[in-house]
Image (tube, helix red, strand yellow):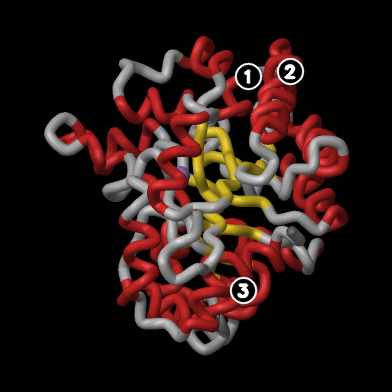
Amino acid sequence: MTTQAGIQIIAIEEHYLDEDVDAKINKGASGLVKERLLDVGAGRIAEMDAAGIDVQILSHCPPGAQCFDESEIERALAVNDKLKNTIDNYPDRFMGFASMPTKVPGACADELQRCVEELGFKGALTHGLTDGVFIDDERYWPMFERAQKLDVPIYVHPGPPHPAVIEAYYKDYVERWPSILSAGWGFTVETATAGLRLMLSGVFDKFPDLKIILGHMGEGLPFLLWRVDFSFSKGFRPDAPNARIREIFTNNFWVTTSGNFSSPALLCTMMEMGIDRILFSVDWPYVENKPGPEWMEGAPLSQKDKIKVLNGNAKKLLRL
Ligand code: MN
């Protein structure tokens, strides 16, 4: 199951699709990606084996339980119960992140606790905006408080841009280049913005041990860290408060390699955050499994650091 180098590989941003969520949102045409999202059985395991991936931490693809409103809360919570069943079918190969019913903010903290304590999940993963609201909004602070108390991370994952942003920034190119709204650009801008807003919100003053994960090698933030940190500090505006961007980003954030198998990006992230904050992931099935471990085999890291990225950092952060 492991790669030729014999290192265990834990991939932590790996998606699936629940049939009831699909029924609600009609995720669109069938195709290989959808087939793979729906497969939480032998086909998925075979694809993991072929790439040397030992464990997938499963999370629902966007929007997950976030598509259900208050009148459908039972369906939202059932998404997590079904994920637990999936994990139980392959307990050595799957673990899970909870899907949060973010349309019902008051339910998120308790559902997170239930998922961690009763279902054995390793944290939660949220997607983008909920009805136009970012995850830093104070309605979600009880969820962050509970995450700190349970000592589990919240994975802040992309979702599509706000319709007003699409209209103003992207619409000219959407038809020819639909990826401008997703992995090509829009997802990154949305999620970097969510990360920045969290750092500006004061949530880390209130919950200093809160742990946030960003995918896609930090959504560009490691590359921008110097400039962002400087621009929100007294060095730039002596009369402004210091937002402590660098301090928060290097204490409270972890990043993953999902869908960004770039050695220059890896080295930049390592220089800004340290190797202990970088976790391997693929972003299956939006990205093929094999290129991830193949890239890591040749990545400019010591064997010791490679082991940290491929499994050690995940074991520590998720307390496996
Ligand atoms: Mn993803």
Q: CA distance from mark 1 to mark 3?
A: 35 Å
Q: CA distance from mark 2 to mark 3?
A: 36 Å
Q: Residue at x 39, y 69 (%)?
A: 296
Residue 301 in view: yes
Q: Nearer the viewer, mark 2 or mark 3?
A: 2
Please name the amino acid that badge 3 sits on: Ala
Q: Residue furthest left?
A: 176
Q: Nearer the viewer, mark 1 or mark 3?
A: 1
Q: Quadrant of residue 92?
A: top right
Residue 102 in view: no
**Most foreground residue, 170 or 308:** 308
Q: Quadrant of the C terminus?
A: bottom right
x, y percent for residue 271: 46, 85
Q: Residue at x 53, y 28 (%)?
A: 41
| Mark 2, residue position | 73
- N-terminal of the pair, mark 2 or mark 1, is 1
- N-terminal of the pair, mark 1 or mark 3, is 1
Lateral position of residue 283 relative to residue 211, left or right: left
Instruction: Look at the numbered disc 1 and give the secondary structure of its residue.
Output: loop
Q: Residue at x 54, y 16 (%)?
A: 19
| Mark 3, residue position | 243
Image mark for residue 68: 1
Q: Residue at x 31, y 16 (%)?
A: 29
Please name the amino acid that badge 2 sits on: Ile
